[in-house]
Image (tube, grey):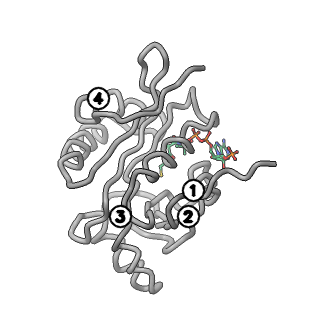
Amino acid sequence: MDLVIGPLELSAHVDEALSIQAAAFGLGADEIAVRRQIVLRHMTFPGARALGATTSDGRLVGFVYGMPNDRTHWWSTVVEPYLRAHGNDDWLDGSFVITELHVHPGHQNLGIGRALITTVTDGAAEPRSILSAIDTDSPARALYRSLGYRDLARQVLFPSAPKPYAVMGAPLPLRRRQRT
Ligand SMILES: CC(C)(COP(=O)(O)OP(=O)(O)OC[C@H]1O[C@@H](n2cnc3c(N)ncnc32)[C@H](O)[C@@H]1OP(=O)(O)O)[C@@H](O)C(=O)NCCC(=O)NCCS
């Protein structure tokens, strides 16, 4: 299938993006309403950038967004003590944070997630990247490891999130897929 990976004006496409996130990540209507406000606020943060994967007939099937980390941002304040406990809190400086990455279930495992995260981090001025992912063996964790992300802290608890997260970090540019 012909797909274009390119800049996405996320504020204008927030509902489409959240419907992908809801399908990929299993969000209910209440959570979507909360996420909607958060995404719109994030898009006003300095350096925030989003990319989308769009089919030839104009459907968004995946998106990623992130921003340079700022220690005053909520996410950073939550993970900071966990990183500090492992001597990894310097990762909060000079890092591009991947805030969300989601591919619609009908289009997963086709290389779209890898292309989105690699392309958005290739455009970052920072020398490294950090993110959080549910602390379990998932396709997301496998993808991040294959890109060079390693665990900086595990069992990280975000207020109101039912499951613990792992915080991962990788040098940029991300590792390219090994050819066999
Ligand atoms: C994680 C996610 C974004 C990956 O996107 P994707 O387009 O499916 O991934 P890709 O096709 O680019 O796959 C890249 C790698 O992911 C891993 N992967 C993808 N699907 C997998 C599966 N079903 N089982 C195990 N690993 C898998 C593999 O390491 C794969 O590498 P390979 O190409 O060398 O085999 C997508 O699966 C998704 O949206 N999942 C649900 C939402 C989510 O968990 N988002 C991340 C929040 S932290």
Looking at the image, tell me whether mark 1 or mark 4 is earlier in sequence order: 4
Circle 2 packing at 10 Å, graded few (<14), some (14-19), many (20+), is many
Q: Amino acid at mark 1?
A: Tyr
Q: Amino acid at mark 2?
A: Tyr
**Considering depth in this image, is 150 or 79 the residue closer to the camera?**
150
Q: Is mark 4 within 8 Å of ligand 1?
A: no
Q: Amino acid at mark 3?
A: Phe
Q: Secondary structure at mark 1?
A: helix
Q: Position of residue 62 (x, y in %)?
A: 46, 33
Q: Is residue 123 above or below residue 170?
A: above
Q: Which residue is mark 2?
A: 149
Q: CA distance from mark 2 to mark 1?
A: 5 Å
Q: Is mark 1 within 8 Å of ligand 1?
A: yes
**Considering depth in this image, is 178 or 145 the residue closer to the camera?**
178
Q: Which mark is residue 23?
A: none
Q: Disc 3 vs disc 4: Cβ atoms closer than 8 Å?
A: no
Looking at the image, tell me whether mark 3 or mark 2 is earlier in sequence order: 2
At 48% from the left and 57% from the top, the residue drawn is 133
